[in-house]
Image (tube, grey):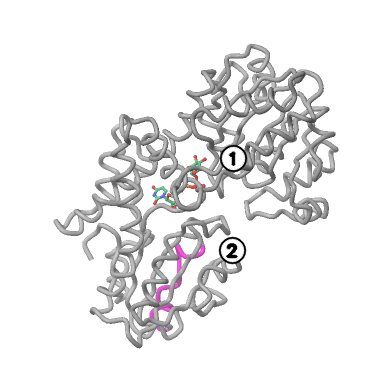
Amino acid sequence: MRIAMIGTGYVGLVSGACFADFGHHVVCVDKDADKIAALHRGEIPIYEPGLDELVAANVKAGRLGFTTDLSVPVGEAEAVFIAVGTPSRRGDGHADLSYVYAAAREIAAALKDFTVVITKSTVPVGTGDEVERLIRETNPEADAAVASNPEFLREGAAIRDFKFPDRIVIGTSDERARKVLGEIYRPLSLNQGPLMYTERRTAELIKYAANAFLATKITFINEMADLAEKVGADVQDVARGIGMDNRIGAKFLHAGPGFGGSCFPKDTRALVKIGLDHEAPLRIVEAVLAVNENRKRAMSRKVLHALGGSLRGKTVAVLGLTFKPDTDDMREAPSIPLVTGLLDMGATVRAFDPAGMAQAREELPDITYCTDAYDCAQGADALVIVTEWVQFRALDLARLKQTLKQPVIVDLRNVYRPEQMAEHGFVYHGIGRPS
Ligand code: UDX
C-alpha cells in the first residue's frame, strides 16, 4: 500500500513510521520545512522511546520518506491520512479545525485515482462530512472516499500502543474504503482481531467517548483520594479493591495531581462543546473538567499545608515537570499550576525533569533548573514528586535526607510507601493515604 501521512506531530510520525514498519510505503508530509529538514537528517522532533530507531530503519529500507509538498505523495497514494493538530480554539474550547480543512482542500487538488482520505486527528462528530464536502467542492472529478480512523496511542508508549492496539476503529460505509483500510491494518488483524468497522460519525464519537471515560475514571479516583484522606482510608487499596472487579477494571485508577497532556483536557473540553451544540449536555464530563482544573490548582496548597502554612522564604524542590513520564511534553502539565502557585505564595522553586526542562523553561522561566534529583533537593524545605519518572522511584533516601534542609516529602504520585518513608525519618504526604 502507498500511504501519504499529512502532519508529522505525535500521531502522524508514529503512525507513519509504524505503517512503514508493516511494509507499506509511507511519505510523511509537513508544511514546517525545518521539521522536514531535521527528519531528513535523522533527528526526531518529539521525545518518544524507540521512535528514532524505527524511523531510521524504515528510511534505510526505503519505505519511509519526508517532504513538505503533498502533491506527489497524495497523487500516488491509495490512502491519505490527515494527522494534523486540532488544538482548543482560543476563547471557546471548540476544536480548531482550520488545519484539517486546509489539508482536505490541498489533498483534494492533488488526488488522482481512487483514494481513501482518512481523518486520524481527533475531530468533532460530523467533521468527516465536511471533509468530504470540501473535497467534492475543490475537485468535483475526484474519486475519493472519506473515513474516520481515530488513534488511541499514548505518549511514551506510542509504538507499543500502535502495534498492539486494543482495537482499531474504522468508520466508513464505503466498501472500497473498508477494503483499503482492512489491507493497511492486515498485519495487525489476522483473524479479524481488533478491527471494528462502523459508521463515520460513530467512529468520531468513539474517540471522544474513550478519552472522556478515561478522564472520568481518573477524576473519580482523585475525588476518592480526597475522601480517603479525610476518613483515614488508603486510596491505593480502594483502587485495587474496585479495579479487581472486571466490570470496573484496574487501569486508569491511579490517583494523582490531575490529568494533563495534549489529549484529555482538550478533548473533554471539545466534547462538552459538542454536547451543548447538540442540546445533549454532558454534565458528567463538565464536572470532570471543573474538578480536574481545581485539583491541579489545589496541589500547591498541599505543599503549603505540609510546610506549616507559610511558604515565604522557603525553598521547594520539584521532581518531574512533564505531564507524565517518558515524554518531554509540558502541555497542561499539573506542574505548571503547582509551580506557579508555589511562586505566588513566596516560595523559591528548584526543579529537575529528565526530558522536559527545555520546554519547561518557556512555561516556567522563574525557577532554578537542576542537574539531577539530589542537586534539586539541595537545601530545600520540601521535596515534591510531580511526575513518576522511573528515575525517581528508587531514590537513595539516606542521601536525600542529608541533602534536604527539612525531611518533608509531598509525593503527588504515591511512588513511595508511607511506612518506608517513616522508617527513614521523613515527614511524608502522599495522595489519599494516611500520612
Ligand atoms: C491519552 C489516552 O490514553 C490515549 O488513548 C489518547 O490517544 C491520547 O490521550 P496520553 O495523553 O498520552 O494518552 O497519556 P495517558 O497515559 O493517558 O495519561 C493522561 C494523563 O492522565 C496524565 O496526566 C497522567 O498522569 C494521568 N493519569 C493517567 C492519572 O493521573 N492516573 C491514571 O491512572 C492514568
Q: Residue at x 65, y 54 (%)?
A: 46
Q: Quadrant of residue 342?
A: bottom left
User: Picture quarter containing residue 147?
Assistant: top right
Neighbourhood count class around disc 1 (C-alpha, 10 Å): few under 14, some 14–19, many 20 upward: some
Disc 2 residue type?
A: Ala
Task: Identify the residue position indicated by label 1 in the image.
Answer: 160
The front one of 202 and 228 is: 202
Q: How many marks?
A: 2
Kind of residue at badge 1: Arg
**Residue in the image at 36% along x and 36% along y:** 276
Secondary structure, mark 2, is loop
Check residue 399 for magenta coloring.
Answer: yes
Residue 37: x %, y % from top left: 81, 54
Q: Is residue 384 above or below residue 122?
A: below
Segment colored magenta? 391-402
> What is the x, y in percent for residue 297?
34, 63
Residue for point 69% across, 55% down: 45
Picture disc at residue 355: 2
User: Residue 380, position in %: x, y?
Assistant: 40, 82
Q: Mark 2 near ligand 1 (CB under 8 Å)?
A: no
What x and y, as percent, mark residue 155? 55, 48
Query: Reading the chain from its start, which is encountered first: label 1 or label 2?
Result: 1
Name the side, left or right, on which 419 lies relative to 135: left
Q: How much space separates mark 1 and mark 2, taking CA atoms?
A: 20 Å
Outermost residue toward the left in this view: 231
